[in-house]
Amino acid sequence: MKTNVGNLFPAVQSKSQRRRAILVGALGLVLTWEAQAHAQSTVEVDATTARKVISAAIVEAQKGPPSSIFVVDNSGVLVAAERMDGAFPASAKIAQGKAETAAAFWQSTGNLENAANGGRAALLSSGYVVMQGGIPLKIDGKVVGAIGVSGGNKDQDEAVAKAGAAAFAK
């Protein structure tokens, strides 16, 4: 398909003005692509780190019932996960939801559970999982990811998530 550049910029009259407009547009695209490439190359929770977090969490989980453990990046996208042998099937979806929730709210899901129990019932219909066991992972106070755990009671899930988060902080 052939495109007439003159029709793309009808308000630009002269040939030199059209060229300048095209160059400015191209420069804008290059800068946008550069920014996106930089953002994509600064992953702060990579697969190796996520596996380290999960390994530490598994050590704690072995003290109780089998668990599912999920690690997500700061946008809630899965980085790594483990469903221990014997963990009930729904624990995987719940653990993922806890991790996504902790990343989205920049706080532990235990705080959100307390808020829901304290009268913020709207949290229950938000689509997020507001039960203990999700903890944000932080670097210099900035949330870069989260861990979510499900399989035991709320205190066991919280302990497993804290063990994973502690390994991230090291």
Image (cartoon, rainbow, N blue to C red):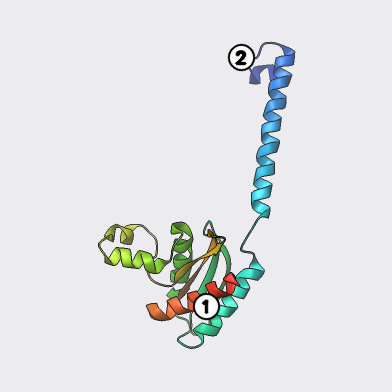
Q: Amino acid at mark 2?
A: Ala
- Near-viewer residue (75 or 84): 75
- Near-viewer residue (114 or 11): 114
Helix, strand or loop under label 1: helix
Q: Residue at 43% x, 74% y: name it.
A: 90
Tell me if mark 2 has few (under 14), some (14-19) or many (20+) residues whose alpha carbon lies within 10 angstroms of its own: few
Location of residue 65 with respect to 90 vertically, above or below = below
- Near-viewer residue (167 or 89): 167
Q: Amino acid at mark 1?
A: Ala
The answer to whether residue 2 shows anywhere in this view is no
Estimate the spatial distance between the alpha carbons at disc 1 and disc 2, rounded to whole Å.
62 Å
The answer to whether residue 104 shows anywhere in this view is yes
- Give the quarter of the figure containing the C terminus: bottom right
Mark 2 lies on residue: 11
Location of residue 108 with respect to 18 vertically, above or below = below
Nearer the camera: disc 1 or disc 2: 1
Tell me if mark 1 has few (under 14), some (14-19) or many (20+) residues whose alpha carbon lies within 10 angstroms of its own: many
Mark 1 lies on residue: 163
Residue that lies at the very extreme toward the bottom in this rendered image: 63
Q: Residue at 70% x, 18% y: name it.
A: 18
Nearer-N-terminus badge (1/2): 2
Circles 1 and 2 in contact, beta carbons < 8 Å: no
47 left or right, relative to 118: right
